[in-house]
Every structure is written in structure tokens, then in C-alpha cells.
Image (cartoon, rainbow, N blue to C red):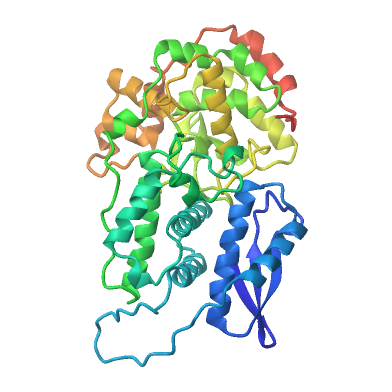
Amino acid sequence: MAYITRRGPVYYLNLRLPEHLFPRCHTLRLSLNIRHRQHALFLATSLAQQVHSHLNAHPMADLQTLRRLCSEWRDSAPSPTIPPAVRKTPTNAVMRNSDGPTLANLSKLYIEEGKRGGTWREVSTHEVERSIRDLFELMGDMPVEAFDVQQARLLKDRLCRCPQYFGLRPEYEGKTLKQVVESGATYKTITAVTVNNRLRKLSAFMNWCKTNGYVADNPLLGLKVMTGPAKEARLSFDRQDLTILLDLAELKAEARKHPWRYWLPLLGRATGARLEELCQLRVDDFIEQQGIQCIRIDDNSEGQNLKNASSRRLLPIHPTLIELGLLGHVESVRGTGADRLFHGLEPIRGKLGHAPSKWFGRYKKKRGITDPRKTFHSFRHTLIDDLRDSGVQDSLIKRIAGHEDGAVTFSIYGSRSPLKAMVDALRHIELGPQVQVAELCHTNQTSMDTETNDD
């Protein structure tokens, strides 16, 4: 996001660039040649939007090119008009002023306040910034009071027509998002779930505007796209799917490039954990409790985030994973001095699971599973369904999955501890094909302990 600093009478742009694209110097500094703070905020926000749009279309752009482009955009930008200061009136009513603060001005303040107060995790910050960027690309900037219910409905309509992977597809190069949306072309659009997520982020921004007295009402309140039942969004894997996906020989071949390609599907099946929970595991998250080898799902360390408080849990390690050499792999990674189990993963927009998610999508299609409702998250649904079919009580299933359960406590298990109850429950879970485990596990370490950078 863009920040401004003042050196003498002139304001400067300080724009933080993605560290994975600019590892050596990830801050772009440029004189705005402006002395008025509100002018500077307006221009800085505009430049930040243009830089991010350019990086979406040209991710290999270098710092010098971005600085040159920023200078050109700065010099060609029209001078914004700043309304004169208005004396406060004794009424609490919101002033309706078409020349009042703009969405761009307020979004800048909103994001700065959210970051300063630690309101969002890194992933959430990326999502907020992305949603606000979409707002400007589709609707342009305007006084906040001009963004009414008609504008809100138009935004929803345009979001529903946004293409998938807009910043990555070559056919969109040189086009704005609004141009593509209004072109009438046929393409695959973002999902209703994605549209609703962005509307929620923008509604939170408008709530902030309302709370701070900039608007009387939030025109986005309750606005969303109708979707089918949540259960239809993802399907569980059937037995044949599991046999295909968890073929140890195939996973071993995939792991020649990255060890996580072997372990993540197996861990997903055996734990039902979310992909991001698995990708951020550290070697010290593998511990022994009550004589049971366990995996700790937590957010105690830097770079670890959880969906909610109920996601924090301790899971027994499935005995088949131990037979396959998981603990040996953990120790080999620990011996390298690495903290994270899958230390080769780099965060993309704050998520370590970005690359594994894309790889798994390609892998399942290559193996003949093409239903888009079957994703890595289907391992989670499959585990829950299998536990339920085996008669495991819902309260224990929720404990294993990291779901909230305020109604039932573990007192129903008498003298048994939750860990022992989990061990009994997980005995019902078969990981997949009965491949010769002993034959494969002694070769896994030599072939997968060293991660390559090939792709």
C-alpha cells in the first residue's frame, strides 16, 4: 500500500512492493512534487493502483521501469480539487457533500488504521487491498456520498462478470478490468463465493465510513450473490478417487521436485486439516503427548495463522504416516536448521498454500479427476464423512476438524482423554491403496529430503 512522507515542503510517495518480486529493494520512493497533504494522498493512492495493475499484467517489471512509469503517471495526472474546510455543525447528521472526501482518500485511511491497529492478518490485508482495488478499477473514484445503492448494484453486477486470473492471462494485457467486463466477451468468471467475499470486504469498509461519520448508510449492507447450498461447493472423494490420488508411487514421482507434493495429500487425508494449516507446519509442531505422536495446529509462530480459535488443536499422527517415514522426514528437515517443515514454500499474497493448491489441481486432472468441486479441501470433507459413517460422535469430529462446538463437551467420553478418543476415531480412516509401505518408506528420505527449485 502507498504511504506519503514529507521532506521539507514536498511530499514523497513510499510504495511497498511485493517482496517475492522485489527481494532486494521492495520500496519505491518518488517525489510527488506536491505540497498539499490531501493532494498528495489522492495522487499517491492513484499511483499505487496503477503500479499494482501494471504488476498484475507485467510481474517481471523491474524497479527502474516502475519508477519511470510512476514519474510519467505523476506528471500526466490532473490536479485534484480540494474542498475548503467546513466548520462543524452542532448536529450529528452526516453532511451530504458531493465535494466531500473520496473513496480513494477514505480507503487509504481505512487501510492505514487497520494495519496500525493489527486488525487484519497478512492474508486478510491482501484481500482487503485487492477488493478495494477492484472497486476503483470497476467504478472509478468518487465522493463517498455518491456511492449509493444504485452504484452498489452496478458494482455487484460488474464483479460477477470479472474474469478469473485477470492479471495473469496474456489476452487481457493492455486492457483494464472494466474494459474486459464491458466487452461482452465469453470467458470464465470468478465464482459467486469470490464475489461475495469481495463484497463483504467492501461492506466492512463502508461500515467504517459510516461509523466515522462520512456516510449515513452502508449501501453494500447485506448485498450478495445468491449461491447454492455450501455442501454443493465441494464434494468428498470416493474410494476410487483416493486410490488414484494417494498412489504412493505416483506421489513419490511428483516429489522429485518438491517433497511437499508427497506429504501434503497424505496429511490432508489423514488429518482433514486445511491446506494452509498443513503448509505452515513447523518441525517443532511434531510433539509427543501422553505417549502419542501428535501434530500441533497452532498460530504461535511468525507466519502461522488460523481461521479461528477453534482451529487450534492437537491431532494424533495416523500410524500409516509414521510407517511411511513422516517423523524421519521431520527430523531430516530439522537437521538442516529449517524451521518450517515445507521450507521451500514461499507465500503468495500471504498464503503458503498457493503453489500447492495450483499443483494439486493439475495433478488431479492428470490423474483423471476433473470435477471442479473436488479440490484439496475435499480431503477434509472426506475425513469428516468417513468419521461420521463410522459412528464417531459429532463433538469429537468437530474437535478433530477444528470446528466450533459450544453445545457438547468432552465429558461425554468419561475417563478417556480427547487424544485417546481421537486415536480410536482415526483407526477408521484408511489412507488409500495398500502399497508395499516398507519398500517405499526407506527410499523416501534419500529422494525427497533435498528440495529442488525446478518447476
Viewer-closest of 130 and 326: 130
Residue 280 position within the rendered picture, expressed as x and y whole percent measured from the top left? 57, 41
Position of 96 with respect to 309 (left or right) is left
Viewer-closest of 93 and 351: 93
Position of 160 with respect to 314 (left or right) is left
Question: Does 145 appear above or below 126?
Answer: below
Q: Quarter holding the C terminus?
A: top right
Q: Quarter holding the N terminus?
A: bottom right
Quarter of image, res 99: bottom left
- Name the residue at the left extreme: 407
Q: Which residue occupies 57% across, 32% down? A: 356
Residue 361 position within the rendered picture, expressed as x and y whole percent measured from the top left? 53, 26
Position of 71 with respect to 84 (left or right) is right
Q: Which residue occupies 73% across, 41% down? A: 337
Q: Is residue 414 visible?
A: no
Question: Does 195 appear above or below 387?
Answer: below
Q: Which residue occupies 61% across, 74% down? A: 4
Quarter of image, res 263: top right
Residue 390 position within the rendered picture, expressed as x and y whole percent measured from the top left? 30, 18
Position of 9 with respect to 309 (left or right) is right
Question: Does 346 appear above or below 381?
Answer: below
Residue 309 position within the rendered picture, expressed as x and y whole percent measured from the top left? 39, 49
Q: Is residue 102 visible?
A: yes
